[in-house]
Amino acid sequence: MALNLYYHPLSSSCWKVLIALDEMGIAFEPRFLDLADTGEREMFLALWPTGKIPLLVDGTRVVPETSIIVEYLSRHYAEPDRSLLPREPDANLEVRLMDRVLDLYAMTPMQVVVADRLRANHERDPIAVAKARETLAMVYGLLERRLDDRPWMAGERFSLADCTAAPALFYAATIVPLPATCHRLGGYYERLLQRPSVARVLEEARPYFQFYPFREALPARFLPAAGG
Ligand SMILES: N[C@@H](CCC(=O)N[C@@H](CS)C(=O)NCC(=O)O)C(=O)O
C-alpha cells in the first residue's frame, strides 16, 4: 500500500520530511493539503487533531511529527546505508540533539515571527517576536561553534539534523540574516542549498513564495520568475 504524505509545498516542516524521503529514495503519494479549505481541514483534523502538517499515513497507521516520521521511514523503508539516523548510539544521539536544537531554537522561533506577521496589527505580539529574533541570533552562534569542521550538521554524513536545518535556516535567514562572522554556518548553509534534495523542495516551493510574508527578504535566486 502506498505511503501518503499530506503536505504543502511552502511549509518548512513539510520540507524536512520531503528532503528525508528524497535522500532515502522512498516513493510516496503526495497529498497536497489546503488547510484554508473547510472540508479538507475537517478531514485532516479527523486524522490528526493538532492539524499540523506534514502527516504520513501508511495504510491504517497515522504517523505524525516530522522527527518521528523520518525515524519511522528510516526504520521501516530505508536501505540500511541510506538511513538518516546512525545506528551507533553516540552518533545517533548527536543527530537527535541537533534535530531538537534546530526544531526548538530555529524552526519554532522562525514560525513565531512568520505567524505574527500574518496577523492583523492589533493581534501582533512584539515581545514574543523580539524574543524569537533573539533566539535565532543565539542559535546561529551555537551552530557556528557546533559545526566546527564538520561538513554536515551532526558529522560526516547527511542526516535527519540536516533535513531540519535546511528549511529552518532558509526561512530564519529571511528574518535574522546569518551573520557574516559565522563563516562555518555560512558555508554549511550554501552546501545545504546545493544539495539536490534541498534544491528540489526549493523549486517546488518557488511558485508559492509570493505568499510568504517575508518574500522581500528571500534571496533573489529563489524568487518566482518575473511574470510567473
Ligand atoms: N512539531 C510539528 C510542527 C509542524 C508544523 O508546525 N507545521 C505547520 C506548517 S510548517 C502547520 O501545520 N501549520 C498549520 C497550523 O498550525 O494550522 C512537526 O515537527 O511535525
Image: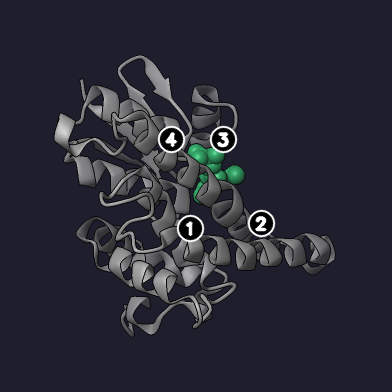
Q: Quadrant of the C terminus?
A: bottom left
Do tag 3 and tag 4 residues touch (Cβ < 8 Å)? no
Do tag 1 and tag 3 residues touch (Cβ < 8 Å)? no
Residue 152 x, y percent position in the rendering: 32, 56
> Residue under circle 4?
93
Q: Amino acid at mark 1?
A: Ala
Do tag 2 and tag 4 residues touch (Cβ < 8 Å)? no
Q: Residue at x 24, y 62 (%)?
A: 195
Judging from the image, the colouring scheme is one colour
Mark 2 to mark 1 CA distance (whole Å): 12 Å
- Nearer-N-terminus badge (1/4): 4
Residue farthest to the top, as pictured: 60
- Nearer-N-terminus badge (3/2): 3
Residue 51: mark in rendering: 3
Residue 168: mark in rendering: 1
Q: Nearer the viewer, mark 3 or mark 4?
A: 4
Q: Quadrant of residue 226?
A: bottom left
Q: Is residue 199 left or right of residue 7?
A: left
Above or below: residue 227 compared with residue 160: below
Q: Nearer the viewer, mark 1 or mark 3?
A: 1
Q: Secondary structure at mark 1?
A: helix
Q: Secondary structure at mark 2?
A: helix
Q: Quadrant of residue 56?
A: top left
Do tag 2 and tag 1 residues touch (Cβ < 8 Å)? no
Mark 3 to mark 2 CA distance (whole Å): 17 Å
Report whether the residue tagged 3 is closer than 8 Å to ligand 1: yes
Q: Secondary structure at mark 3?
A: loop
> Residue under circle 2?
112
* Image quadrant, ligand 1: top right
Q: Nearer the viewer, mark 2 or mark 4?
A: 4
